[in-house]
Amino acid sequence: MKLSKYPYVVQNEILDHMNYSDLFELSLVSKKIRKLVKSSQMNRLKNTVSVMYDCCYPFGTPLVYIQFKNNNILDCSKLFYFTPYGTRSIIESFHNNFLYFFGNSVEYHWITDNYKLPIPRLENLSMCFRIIIGDTFGDLKNVDNFLSSHPVLKSIDLGYWLKESLSPESESRLYQVEYIKINQLNRTNPAVLRNFQGKQAIIDCYLFEAADLIDFVNRWISGEAYHKLEYLAIYKYREEIPRDEILTAIGARHIDATRKPPAHSVPRAFIEYASRPNTDPIISHSYVVRESDNRVASVLIERDTLSFGVWDKTEEEFLRMVEKLQLAN
Amino acid sequence: MSSTEQGTSSAAPAEPTTAPESAAAPEVPESFYYVHGKDKVVHKVSAGALQHSALIHGMISNLGYTEEQAKANPFPFENIDGDILQMVVDWCNQHKGKPTPPEDTNLPKQKEKLFDLVLAVNYLEIKELLTYCCKQVAMMVKGKSPEEIREIWMIPTDAEDEAAEKEAKKRAGKEAAGETAAAAGDAK
């Protein structure tokens, strides 16, 4: 059976019935076939959002999968298992194949929990790192070196139980990551809250002072820090966050209590296995305004959690949106 | 005029007013057409079954054949093997007037037969059957490595493709040169 003997319309129909994994295997057969796959499956392939090289796939074998939009719902599909630190030319050939199909239109993530093995330098590849640093961990310098070794740092999922910082705070690459999820069980102030320069942060902390939160919000208001911040949620294990004290200290403004506040939610900067594509909605009557550009951030304090969501709107635009929401209801 | 070989209508109910509306309507006698493949064996197929084929359905609509004319002029499909046409006719008969199921497990398992069936079905424009066939062809490479896929679908390597391309260019060059020489000869 020669595939090439079929008319294009039939080849197209056959390829339409193949899953992503088989299509990618097929595309590795020859250059001509790769061209056919690209032209025939363009409509399907253009919905791809990211290519994930997951070296810590929960069920053992490292896996390459893609995430794509299916009728506006995020979905994912396994492509193949792989050997992350095997022959470099094989990984390069996979990656070049992805670049041929997607170019710069998707994100390429390398997910690892092993700071001792370097990440291959591949075009457009970003690093996603997860690690649990226990209270007896003694190799911080190498972790920090590892974080500095790759040009693009996308996400860090960190369990951090040491008292000392990873490196001189303001210098660590850790704080430049786009998305961070940190679980910090010691009693020191959360360094991430002070130094974060990325877009989204989720911080679970054993204990911290109200003054730390007040300082964070005030530095955002003054424009001193957190210029790229879109979303931050901080959970305090030990006790409730003093809501009124903080709202007063940060000079929060409030939407009329009879009005329904808008829900702030943005696409997550880092998504795995197509789960929870957006940040948890923040629905709050309280907000603050950045002095430099009049930009609004919703502030929600509920028992042990402070959520902070930055809008792409000035105060005027934000209040107009509240009015519209009122009229719509 | 249409064929009446399959009977025309059932008995009318005694009380038409109490009968269901569909039973009261007179049944239209079914028309039949004739097709043959490479082996010249003629198959009689109802218009209902042939509706699956957009190509034949279009031909029927345009021709307006009577039963006798249809019998005398079977549609010739010289590019389709007799056994393949038989499969197509059987499938059309089986699925006449019925919604097509999501899967069809009665397709040929042999690669070459399936290959010919796909070509025939594509030519006859039988959309549902083409979908089933293409699905089956796609399933042949499910979970296979690139080398296995190459073998199953007889895909040339890059080197083979390049060699074939060179050969085609060479041939085209020769033909062009021949034409030029012939034109020059004519001019003389």
Image (tube, rainbow, N blue to C red):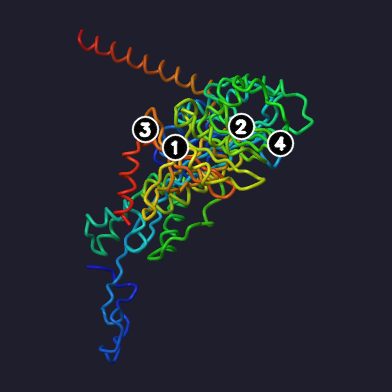
Q: Earlier in the sequence, mark 4 or mark 2?
A: 2
Q: CA distance from mark 3 to mark 2?
A: 30 Å
Per the model, the C-alpha gap separating discs 2 and 1 is 21 Å
Judged from the image, the secondary structure of the residue bearing numbered disc 3 is loop
Q: Which mark is residue A244?
A: none
**Residue marked by disc 3:** A294
Report the residue marked by disc 4: A186
Q: Which residue is mark 2?
A: A156
Q: Nearer the viewer, residue A140 or B49?
A: A140
Secondary structure under badge 4? loop
Between discs 1 and 3, the one toward the N terminus: 3
- Dot 4 or dot 3: first in sequence order is 4
Closer to the eye: label 4 or 2? 4
Distance Cα–Cα, label 1 vs label 3: 11 Å
Circles 1 and 3 on the same subunit: yes
Name the residue: 62% across, 22% down: A172
Q: Position of residue A25 (x, y in %)?
A: 57, 34
Q: Residues within 10 Å of mark 2 (few under 14, many from 20)?
A: many
From mark 4 to mark 2, how far is it between C-alphas? 18 Å
Secondary structure category for the residue under label 2: strand
Q: Is residue A234 visible?
A: yes
**CB atoms at circles 3 and 2 under 8 Å apart?**
no
Q: Given the image, on which type of amino acid does mark 1 rest?
A: Val
CB within 8 Å, label 4 to label 3: no
N-terminal-most mark, 4 or 1: 4
